[in-house]
Amino acid sequence: MSTEAAAPPNPLDNNLARIIGEFAADSGTIHFIADDGMLHLAAASAGMPEQVLAIIRTIPVGKGMAGLAVERAQPVDACNIQTDTSGDVRPGAKATGLAGSIVVPIFNGEKVVGALGVANRSERVFTADEIARLQEEGRKLAALRV
C-alpha cells in the first residue's frame, strides 16, 4: 500500500470534462498564459494521445488556433482541421484526428489570460449561441486559474 497522498482533483479537469459533455464534443484543452508569455497546457481531455500532448504542451501566442485566439482576442474555428487551408491550423493539429474545432480566448475581465478549445471527430460548425456560451465558460475558468 502506498503512503503517498493522492493528488487533489484538478478543478480544471472536472470543468473541461463537463464542458466537453455539454457541447457534445469529443475532446478539449485549456491553456493559460504563463510568466514566459507562452500558453501552457493546464488541462486536456482524457485519452489525448501523448504525441499530441507533446505538441500542445506549450504554444506561442500567435501560433495555431489557441495562439491565434489569444493574439486576436477572438474565437478561431475550423469546420474541419483535416482539410483547413486558412493558415490558422498548425500542421501538427492533424495528428489529433479531429475535424470540427473551436478555440475561444479566456478573459479575466478585459485581459486575455488563456484559451479554451473543444473539438469533434466529425465536421462541425459552432453556432453563435454556442460560441457565446463557450466564452462565458472561459470567464469561469479564469477564476480557477492556478
Image (tube, rainbow, N blue to C red):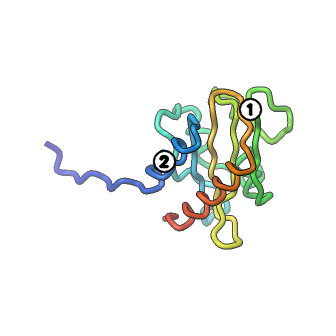
At which x and y percent is residue 119?
Answer: 63, 38
- Residue farthest to the front, as pictured: 129
Residue at the spot 75% in from the left edge and 52% down from the top edge: 75
Q: Earlier in the sequence, mark 2 or mark 1?
A: 2
At which x and y percent is residue 142?
Answer: 57, 64
Image quadrant where residue 109 sits: bottom right
Q: Please tell me how crowded label 1 is: few (under 14), some (14-19), or many (20+) other residues with Cα within 10 Å.
A: many
Image quadrant where residue 77 sits: top right
Task: Decide: is 141 above or below 101.
Answer: below
Image quadrant where residue 61 sits: bottom right
Task: Decide: is 16 above or below 84.
Answer: below
CB under 8 Å between discs 2 and 1? no
Residue for badge 1? 81
Q: Which circle marks residue 72 in the picture?
A: none
Task: Decide: is 47 above or below 135.
Answer: above
Q: Secondary structure at mark 1?
A: loop
Residue for badge 2? 18
